[in-house]
Amino acid sequence: MFETERESMVRHQLEGRGIIDRRVLDAMRMVERHLFVNEDDRPYAYEDRPIPIGSGQTISQPFMVALMTQTLSLAGDERVLEIGTGSGYQTAILAELAQDVFTVERIAGLQVHAKRCLDPLNYTNIHYKTGDGTLGWSSQAPFDRILVTAAAPRVPQKLFEQLKIAGRMVVPVGGRLSQELDLVLKKTGGKMQVMHRGGCIFVPLVGKDGWERD
Ligand code: SAM
């Protein structure tokens, strides 16, 4: 279903705007985004925008999913920590491209729903946790890659601690209304290097090392 819409999304919204990672493009061609939105929203699933998924949260715009995933630079053998499971769509893309995905969501109902969407797709490399993702997942650390899909006021310290040396974290950082997409590198000796990858708008990362409230 929706093959034409999906192909058009990849051609115009992703390739047309500079997404060049073949593996990312192939994954986004394959994963059926309409399965991750409410039934009424399925006809709009491939449009160039975020879509509400309940509890005041959204499934991210396809271009933003592609840009964040490309920025992670995945070869296939990485252990990835994702903060903000949301609909589970980005989780599926990561599960296609990495060895293992550890995904944390603070809203239990959303995680249940995401799991319900992902289970029939038979991924065996997704691990779920409900809780405050600003604290990471210490028992599974360290991670090769960390992706934060909500807006942080600063780079969350615990997440940086749980990143491997030479690891990469992608995180929107800034104010509540708009942010910069940051690529955070952990250099030898544990030094942090931050590079900006463009402006973005995300829902707030709410937790101990994030914003106090939605
Ligand atoms: N990537 C998701 C997708 O494809 O549907 C979209 C994620 S949505 C933009 C951001 C998610 O981050 C929301 O589901 C929100 O509940 C979650 N979130 C916010 N703060 C969090 C925290 N401290 N820990 C875990 N999840 C958090």
Image (cartoon, rainbow, N blue to C red):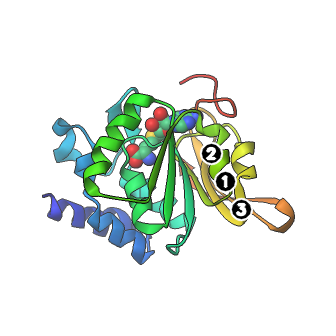
Looking at the rendered structure, the secondary structure element under dot 3 is strand
Mark 3 closeness class: few <14, some 14–19, many ≥20 residues within 10 Å: many
Q: Position of residue 136 (x, y in %)?
A: 64, 43
Distance between the Cα atoms at labels 2 and 3? 13 Å
- Circle nearer the viewer, 2 or 3: 2
Which residue position is annotated with label 3?
164
**Is residue 113 shown above or below 168?**
above
Question: Sequence order check: which comes first, mark 2 or mark 3?
Answer: 2
- Circle nearer the viewer, 3 or 1: 1
Q: Position of residue 102 (x, y in %)?
A: 52, 51
Q: Amino acid at mark 1?
A: Ala
**Mark 3 vs ligand 1: CB under 8 Å?**
no
Q: What is the total number of numbered labels drawn onto the structure image?
A: 3
Q: Position of residue 99 (x, y in %)?
A: 49, 67
Q: Are marks 1 and 2 in contact (CB under 8 Å)?
A: yes
Front residue of this view, candidates 47 and 86: 86
**Is residue 97 shown above or below 203?**
below
Distance between the Cα atoms at labels 1 and 2? 6 Å
**Is residue 135 shown above or below 103?**
above
Is residue 45 something that shows in the picture? no
Would you identify the image quadrant in which residue 10 lies?
Answer: bottom left
Which residue position is annotated with label 1?
141
Q: Are marks 3 and 1 in contact (CB under 8 Å)?
A: no
Q: Amino acid at mark 3?
A: Lys
Q: Which residue is painted at 58% across and 30% down in the image?
A: 206
Mark 1 closeness class: few <14, some 14–19, many ≥20 residues within 10 Å: some
Which residue position is annotated with label 2?
137
Question: Sequence order check: which comes first, mark 3 or mark 1?
Answer: 1
Would you identify the image quadrant in which residue 112 lies?
Answer: top left
Mark 2 closeness class: few <14, some 14–19, many ≥20 residues within 10 Å: many
Q: Amino acid at mark 2?
A: Trp
